[in-house]
């Protein structure tokens, strides 16, 4: 048994890579992950990923923001210290709309983005777990966990047929640790 | 494969021979990965000189008091709020391009949204500096925030448009920042993986450990979409609220219900003009002709023409309403824009914003880089005067003729304004040095579908309707980055 | 089981070596070298690491302990032994008198901080002029002399006394003359002191010298009735007033008194009884009085006499020899009309003339005699003592000094070196006088020429009395100890004449006990104390004697015509020039007072300058623009003055104000404007105010700091006026309160005003625009003076301003719009309207809604409040104020050396009102309706356990207004004066249509014009 941990198929064209995925799946070779320099539409369905639920989070955060600021305003101007401001009543709802709206947006944006970073384990200074350095440039990389019982050369062949321009047998999972 | 190919009659968004994914990266990262050229250094020197002037003038104001400006008991706002509104307006184009055009699936936005968003952020910074420096006691600038305080129950006035401003501007700034930076992550990763040594470390920290795995991309796209979704109403609300500073007041010339839509249109108008001004230069200096093509330039000119006309209609409406309302003060104010002592400012406003932009109806004007650039500057000037006219001309002759006064700017007014421009360009020039000025990943998306070479392949295959092919070839004539020669034989 | 094992630290301990035992005695193994470390030598030698640590530890510990000590609190005690009459925080009022007006001096903690009219004052009923209001600031003027001076050096009083007495002794010997030159003294006690002095030095003589004198009138009365007095005019008894260039509402004799009289027949009360006097003004330049006249006719100075001659002819039906028609047909017509109206108003008419010419005034007397004014509108029996100056007397003095007849001359409150028409002649003559004493309070133009300066007390530091009107005696009592080492001039005279009475206070007491108290039915200590409560005594008016005019007029007319001929300007660069006193500075004695310098001239709205007022047509003719500098010269003397466009200025004339161009007034007044006194001339025994000058353009420019630069109302219903006839028909005319009055409903429920709802009513018909309220407000509310440059940048800080609008009559139609006006061919026929403008305290205040930090909100008593220390200075409130009454502190006027005309030095700080905070740079401020006075009034009522009465609280502006144009009060009380006024038909609210619900109502101005001159 070789020391290969991961087998990478490097493609230079997204469409070709998509075919590669089909081929591998036809040969029931489990795909660990795919790394691309740009979003490839339809790939997530192909790999059977559930659609993201960030939208719901965003909605919740929005509601939270709106409620928070409206309560603050109500407490300050109506409950805690009502004043005669230009003869207007203390509880002037139309005047409270702008601030309420702004905080709704604010909470939505920040809440959702932070959730995204949290869910995807992105944060400043996180060590990049990169399998191939050109995956962010011009290579479309299909990563296959070598610890399957399929012989590595079969995988290599399948990838070759699929049109991978280069095939790597990596002994280490990530190249970017040094 | 055919499914990717868009209709032949669409003009290419990326021009140039044998562009590969690698070449895209190469071209866009060139300014980031190499020492800057002379053009950049000259620009940067000038800009930072301007910024120093700004620092000096603002410190001067803080030390001696706001009286160093030309304001008086009648004209309480002038260049300060003019500059504020002008900068905020400029900022709007960025969000518009990145958000609204994304929702409308306008692919040509991909190559300009990055620098437009950067511009938004820097413009809003300039605007914010005005908000602080125009205060009588700037060291208390935090008082308009609803903070629990030791003064007893001293809360802020949520009826005041200025407080709305505080909320709008701060939200707008932070949300734009998030949107912009999230978009930067994949490109920063690209730089990281190409760089070595300390630069690699820095970009590694900045790129949050981006890998480009499927799940990341999927979530990334959701986030971009929703951020675009919330930024669209946000950007509209911001200038609406800015316009309410005037619309909710009593001042004739301010007290106008048309202001929100009119200001938003004006903001997009001036914003696109500023994007145009910047990109036409950037494109040359950084040699990005293949990615910011004549198609982009013309599209932006079309939007400038559209918004400029909307603004023109708003102007006409204002005058009609002033006449139709029968309010004598209102009527006088609008007449005064042409007959009063500031008539020249009125002419600059209406002339630059409405008349000049109408030239864009001509394709030859839209597709002429130099004229486009001049016009974009003209629009910037015109929009500055629009704010000046609205603020100063309305104030200087309002209800009681006994208080009518003139406004004369001092050298401090000049310096703060010129300086703020210096500040803006300093930030922008630094930006194009350290960040990719074009969204690499998003441009790569277009490479296979909408690039010139892809379309040339299609022509070579030649399953196209002849007249469509002909139409396409014709459309290429205006491009300055396309060599037409080999289309002859096709 | 407990162990008795022995543990030892080392072998030394085990075998108990001696040095170990020795060491064990000490706390530390080796001694700590604290001493030698602390000693200088120790510091020199190098300390080991350990010691450093020890020192460090010690140091830190020591410092920590020291820091635990509380910071000592210094308690300041206002009074160690409190004077019984002074309660910190409570104001004391002392009766005194200013220019003969009974006044109240408001003091706080022993400092006079404000002067207010005594409501019982017989002359102006509590009203005071801007000058009187500003006078309190001069008390603290640090340019007053701090000590006597001898031959230009500081000296002690003893030295001065010794010097002067020696000199006087010599003079007594050689019998040379002594002159005491003083502006009019009507104080009985002072006169008595001077009499004593004269008794001691028989060659001494008091010479009354008034910068602006009324010799003409006095002499004319001598001619006409053999009574050389200044009559007491009674405008309140006149239904028809015809004034020939007499600015009796502004500067003529006793303006604030005359305002009070004049308004009697023009205020709401008289209007409601359908009665209003009529006022016709013939004049050259636009005076404050002229601007308030119902009808104003333009005549040249040279034609004033002629017009009077024609008027006399019309009235008497005779034709005096040499009389000729006026050049302007309009004026000619007007004279005839005036004559008609005067005929009709016999016995209730009054003709006054501003000229200082004997002949002219004699003719005026003849006219008044014709109209039977004597005993009705002119009182020669209870005459005025306010001006006794005799120009001839002083002219003779100068001549005599020149001859060397005089060995001593003393100046009291007189400054001929500045304000004599021929200062050069005077100063030359003065050089020949050995002993020159000045009692003036500062080193002014005259004092610097004197070898002795014995500075007089300021009136707020003095004892004394005044007798402005015959039979009316007011007392002056000090409100503070002398601020500087000065001495009252009476005291000086008493010392120099070895008076038996040692101090002047006793002298005044005795004088009153002997002569004056009795007049008021008072006597003894009791009477004196009563006097110090009431402030004056009044003798019953003498009954009117009957006066028949007996004087040959032919000669008079001859003189008048000759002068007219001399005055007529011929040639293109010649013009008739008329000098006048400006309301703010008058004769220039208070030129160093910044409040007055920054007080806008009522008509021209110019501050910090005098100027050459010219008619718009003349300027068009000669191609001059406003602010162009022209050189005006007359035999040898010439000044450069900026030109001001003055609609209503007679064509072919220039008017220039005196009182400016002081060279030795002090830092504030020095070099402000140009001196116009030399333009006067001495003819026929009096000083004439009109002359012919030649002028040329210089091509230079000089900005005039005006507080208002747009003068027409643009056809807006902001100020409203009507004619008396219309008013009689329909009292609500033009006020909009008639049937078709639009009611503006509020969108919200109004807030509760449980107790008070403070509002104000301002009567545009009573306001003459004099500006007293502006100064009173500055004094009450510590309003900074910003100086001419800042005013020119439109940044004056006055909380109350008086808007002045011109409207031009074009064939009976009022033209008020810029475009039309510029098209008109002549702007002579102009009518003026004044509108005091201050914070309107709107119930729906637009400023409050927009303040981000809630620095300005509404009180439960209906006024708009401003929290200075919450303000961050966005200026949004000011922008959103339709009345533009908010004022912003552009700089730190309180300690910024660039605004060093006032309040930067420690003396003038003392004038600040402690009830009002001073404002910091960058905050907004505005009228507060004098809420400190509101609070004070409420407290007073509370202490006296009574409800607040209407009129208990008066705002500063209201309190000083001589015409009671401003009324302040509680709207919740339907019986309050203000409620009544606001209910009256004439009331309108400015910009009511905006729905801001202003709290200040204005009353329509009524003009008593006849359709004839329309």
Image: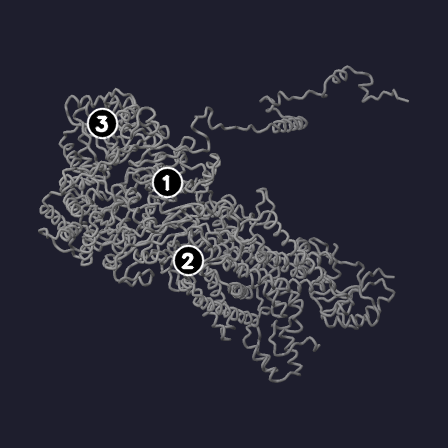
Q: Chain of mark 2?
A: B
Q: Is residue C156 above or below residue C637?
A: above
Badge 1 crowding class, 10 Å Cα cut-off, few under 14, some 14 to 19, many 20 or more, is some
Callout 2 secondary element = loop
Front disc: 1 or 3? 3
Distance from the alpha carbon under mark 2 to that under mark 1: 32 Å
Distance from the alpha carbon under mark 2 to that under mark 3: 61 Å
Residue furthest out toward the bottom: B466
Q: Residue at x 47, y 60 (%)?
A: B254
Distance from the alpha carbon under mark 1 to that under mark 3: 37 Å
Total of numbered circles in the picture?
3
Q: Chain of mark 1?
A: C
Q: Which quadrant of the figure has residue C583?
A: top left
The answer to whether C229 appears left or right of C954 in the picture is left
Front disc: 2 or 3? 3
Q: Which mark is residue C194?
A: 3
Residue at the disc numbered 1: C901
Q: Are marks 2 and 3 on the same chain?
A: no
Callout 1 secondary element = loop
Callout 3 secondary element = helix
Q: Position of residue C324 (x, y in %)?
A: 12, 54
Q: Which quadrant of the figure has residue B473?
A: bottom right
Q: Which mark is residue B398?
A: 2
As rendered, which of B383 and B36 lies closer to the eye? B383
């Amino acid at each position: 048994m070789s020391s290969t941990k991961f087998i990478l198929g490097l493609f230079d064209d997204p469409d070709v890579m998509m075919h590669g995925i089909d081929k591998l799946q036809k040969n029931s070779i489990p795909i660990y992950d795919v790394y691309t320099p740009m979003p490839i539409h339809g790939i997530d369905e192909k790999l059977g990923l559930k659609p993201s639920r960030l939208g719901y989070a965003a909605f919740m955060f929005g509601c939270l923001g709106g409620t928070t600021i409206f309560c603050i305003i109500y407490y300050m101007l109506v409950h805690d210290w009502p004043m005669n401001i230009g003869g207007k009543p203390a509880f002037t709802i139309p005047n409270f709309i702008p601030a309420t709206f702004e905080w709704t947006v604010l909470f939505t944006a920040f809440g959702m983005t932070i959730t995204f970073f949290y869910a995807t384990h992105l944060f400043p200074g996180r060590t990049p777990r990169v399998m191939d350095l050109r995956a962010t440039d011009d290579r479309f990389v299909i990563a296959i966990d070598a610890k399957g019982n399929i012989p590595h050369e079969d995988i290599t062949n399948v990838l070759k047929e699929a049109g991978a321009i280069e095939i790597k047998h990596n002994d280490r999972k990530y190249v970017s640790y040094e | 494969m055919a499914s990717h190919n868009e209709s032949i009659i669409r003009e290419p968004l990326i021009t140039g021979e044998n562009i590969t994914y690698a070449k895209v990266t190469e071209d866009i990262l060139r300014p980031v990965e190499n020492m800057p050229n002379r053009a950049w250094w000259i620009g940067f020197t000038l800009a930072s000189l301007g910024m120093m002037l700004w620092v000096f003038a603002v410190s001067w104001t803080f030390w001696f008091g706001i009286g160093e400006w030309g304001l008086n008991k009648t004209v309480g706002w002038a260049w300060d709020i003019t500059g504020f509104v002008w900068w905020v307006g400029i900022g709007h184009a960025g969000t518009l391009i990145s958000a609204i055009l994304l929702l409308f699936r306008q692919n040509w936005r991909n190559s300009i949204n990055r620098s437009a968003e950067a511009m938004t952020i820097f413009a809003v910074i300039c605007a914010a500096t005005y908000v602080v420096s125009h205060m009588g006691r700037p060291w208390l600038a935090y008082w308009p925030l609803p903070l629990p305080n030791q003064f007893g129950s001293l809360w802020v006035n949520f009826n005041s448009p200025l407080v709305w401003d505080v909320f709008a501007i701060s939200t707008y700034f932070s949300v734009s920042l998030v949107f912009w930076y999230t978009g930067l992550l994949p490109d920063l990763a690209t730089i990281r993986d190409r760089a070595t040594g300390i630069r690699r470390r820095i970009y590694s920290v900045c790129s949050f450990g981006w890998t480009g795995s499927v799940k990341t991309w999927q979530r990334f796209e959701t986030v971009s979409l929703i951020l675009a979704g919330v930024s669209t109403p946000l950007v509209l609300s911001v200038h609406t609220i800015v316009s309410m500073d005037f619309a909710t007041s009593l001042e004739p010339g301010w007290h106008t219900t048309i202001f929100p839509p009119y200001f938003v249109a004006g903001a997009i108008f001036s914003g696109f003009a500023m994007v145009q001004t910047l990109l036409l230069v950037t494109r040359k200096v950084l040699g990005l002709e293949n990615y910011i093509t004549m198609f982009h330039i013309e599209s932006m000119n079309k939007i400038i023409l559209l918004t400029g006309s909307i603004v023109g209609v708003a102007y006409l409406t204002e005058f009609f309403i002033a006449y139709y309302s029968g309010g004598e003060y209102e009527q006088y104010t609008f007449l005064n824009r042409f007959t009063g002592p500031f008539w020249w400012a009125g002419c600059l406003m209406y002339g630059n914003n409405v008349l000049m932009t109408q030239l864009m109806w001509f394709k030859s004007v839209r597709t002429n880089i130099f004229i486009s650039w001049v016009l974009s500057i003209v629009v910037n000037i015109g929009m500055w005067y629009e704010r000046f006219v609205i603020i100063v001309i309305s104030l200087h002759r309002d209800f009681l003729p006994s208080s009518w006064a003139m406004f004369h700017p001092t050298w401090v007014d000049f310096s703060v304004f010129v300086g703020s421009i210096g500040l803006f360009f300093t930030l922008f020039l630094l930006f194009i040095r350290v960040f990719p000025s074009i969204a690499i990943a998003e441009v790569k998306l277009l490479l296979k579908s909408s690039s010139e070479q892809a379309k040339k392949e299609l022509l070579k295959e030649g399953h196209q309707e002849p007249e469509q092919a002909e139409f396409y070839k014709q459309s290429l004539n205006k491009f300055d980055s396309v060599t037409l020669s080999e289309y002859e034989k096709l | 089981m407990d162990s008795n094992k022995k543990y030892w630290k080392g072998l030394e301990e085990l075998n108990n070596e001696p040095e170990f035992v020795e060491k064990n005695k000490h706390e530390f193994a080796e001694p700590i070298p604290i001493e030698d470390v602390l000693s200088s030598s120790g510091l020199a030698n190098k300390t080991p690491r350990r010691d450093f640590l020890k020192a460090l530890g010690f140091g830190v510990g020591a410092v920590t302990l020291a820091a635990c000590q509380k910071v000592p609190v210094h308690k300041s005690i206002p009074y160690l032994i409190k004077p019984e009459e002074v309660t910190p925080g409570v104001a004391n009022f002392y009766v005194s008198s200013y220019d003969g007006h009974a006044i109240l001096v408001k003091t706080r903690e022993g400092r006079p901080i404000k002067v207010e009219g005594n409501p019982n004052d017989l002359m102006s009923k509590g009203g005071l002029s801007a000058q009187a209001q500003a006078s309190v600031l001069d008390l603290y003027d640090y340019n007053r002399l701090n000590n006597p001076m001898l031959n230009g050096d500081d000296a002690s009083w003893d030295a001065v006394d010794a010097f002067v007495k020696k000199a006087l002794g010599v003079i007594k010997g050689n019998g040379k003359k002594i002159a005491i030159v003083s502006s009019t003294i009507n104080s009985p006690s002072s006169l008595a002191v001077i009499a004593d002095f004269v008794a001691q030095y028989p060659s001494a003589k008091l010479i009354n010298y008034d910068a602006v004198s009324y010799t003409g009138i006095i002499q004319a009365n001598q001619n006409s009735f053999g009574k050389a007095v200044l009559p007491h005019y009674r405008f309140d008894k006149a239904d028809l007033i015809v004034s020939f260039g007499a600015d009796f509402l502004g500067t003529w004799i006793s303006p604030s008194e005359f305002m009070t009289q004049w308004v009697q027949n023009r205020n709401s009360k008289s209007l409601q009884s359908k009665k209003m006097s009529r006022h016709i003004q013939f004049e050259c330049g636009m005076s404050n009085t002229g601007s308030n006249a119902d009808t104003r006719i333009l005549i040249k100075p040279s034609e004033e006499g002629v017009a009077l001659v024609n008027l006399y002819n019309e009235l008497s039906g005779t034709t005096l020899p040499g009389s000729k028609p006026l050049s302007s047909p309009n004026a000619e017509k007007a004279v005839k009309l005036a004559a008609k109206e005067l005929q009709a108003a016999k016995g209730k008419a009054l003709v006054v003339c501003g000229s200082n010419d004997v002949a002219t005034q004699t003719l005026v007397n003849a006219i008044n005699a014709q109209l039977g004014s004597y005993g009705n509108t002119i009182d020669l029996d209870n005459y005025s003592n306010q001006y006794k100056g005799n120009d001839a007397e002083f002219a003779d003095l100068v001549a005599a000094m020149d001859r060397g007849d005089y060995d001593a001359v003393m100046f009291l409150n007189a400054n001929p070196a500045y304000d004599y028409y021929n200062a050069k002649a005077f100063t030359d003559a003065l050089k020949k006088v050995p002993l020159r004493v000045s009692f003036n309070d500062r080193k002014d133009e005259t004092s610097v020429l004197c070898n002795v300066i014995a500075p007089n007390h300021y009136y707020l530091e003095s004892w004394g009395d005044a007798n402005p009107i015959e039979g009316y005696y007011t007392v002056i009592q000090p409100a503070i100890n002398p601020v500087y080492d000065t001495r009252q001039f009476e005291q000086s005279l008493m010392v120099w004449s070895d008076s038996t009475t040692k101090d002047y206070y006793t002298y005044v007491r005795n004088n009153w006990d002997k002569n004056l108290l009795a007049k008021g039915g008072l006597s003894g200590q009791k009477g004196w104390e009563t006097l110090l409560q009431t402030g004056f005594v009044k003798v019953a008016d003498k009954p009117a004697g009957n006066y028949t005019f007996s004087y040959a007029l032919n000669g008079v007319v001859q003189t008048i015509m000759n002068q007219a001929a001399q005055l007529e300007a011929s040639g293109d660069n010649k013009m008739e020039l008329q000098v006048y006193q400006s309301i703010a500075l008058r004769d220039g004695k208070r030129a160093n007072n910044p409040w007055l310098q920054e007080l806008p001239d009522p008509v021209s709205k110019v501050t910090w300058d005098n100027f050459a007022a010219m008619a718009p047509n003349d300027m068009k003719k000669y191609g001059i623009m406003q602010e162009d500098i022209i050189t005006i010269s007359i035999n040898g003397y010439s000044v450069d003055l900026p030109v001001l466009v003055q609609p209503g200025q007679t064509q072919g004339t220039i008017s220039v104000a005196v009182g400016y161009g002081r060279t030795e007034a002090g830092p504030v007044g020095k070099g402000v404007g140009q001196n116009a006194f030399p333009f006067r001339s001495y003819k026929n025994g009096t000083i004439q105010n009109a002359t012919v000058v030649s002028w040329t353009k210089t091509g230079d420019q000089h900005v005039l700091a005006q507080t208002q630069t747009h003068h027409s109302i643009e056809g807006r219903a902001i100020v409203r006026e009507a004619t008396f006839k219309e008013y009689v028909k329909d009292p609500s005319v033009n006020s909009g309160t008639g049937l078709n009055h639009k009611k503006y409903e509020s969108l919200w429920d109004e807030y509760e005003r449980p107790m008070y709802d403070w509002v104000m009513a301002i009567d545009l018909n009573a306001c003459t625009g004099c500006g007293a309220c502006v100064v009173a407000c500055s004094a009450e509310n510590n309003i900074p003076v910003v100086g001419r440059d800042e005013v020119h940048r439109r940044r004056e800080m006055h909380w109350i301003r008086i808007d002045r609008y011109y409207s031009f009559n074009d064939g009976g139609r009022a033209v008020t719009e810029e475009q039309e006006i510029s098209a008109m061919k002549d702007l002579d026929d102009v009518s003026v309207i004044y509108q005091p403008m201050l914070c309107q305290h709107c119930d729906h205040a637009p400023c409050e809604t927009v303040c981000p930090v809630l620095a300005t909100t509404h009180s439960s008593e209906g006024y708009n409040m401003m929290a200075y220390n919450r303000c961050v200075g966005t200026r949004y409130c000011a922008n959103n104020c339709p009345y533009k009454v908010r004022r912003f502190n552009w700089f730190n006027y309180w300690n910024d050396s660039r605004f060093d005309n006032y309040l930067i030095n420690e003396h003038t700080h003392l004038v600040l009102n402690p009830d009002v905070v001073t404002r910091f740079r960058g905050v907004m401020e505005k009228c507060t309706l004098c809420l400190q006075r509101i609070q004070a009034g409420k407290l007073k009522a509370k202490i006296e356990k009574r409800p607040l009465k209407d009129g208990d609280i008066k705002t500063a502006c209201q309190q000083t207004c001589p015409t009671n144009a401003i009324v302040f009060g509680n709207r919740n009380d339907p019986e309050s004066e203000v409620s009544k006024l606001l209910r009256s038909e004439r009331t309108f609210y400015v910009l009511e249509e905006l729905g801001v619900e202003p709290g200040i109502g204005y009353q329509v101005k009524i003009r008593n014009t006849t359709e004839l001159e329309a």
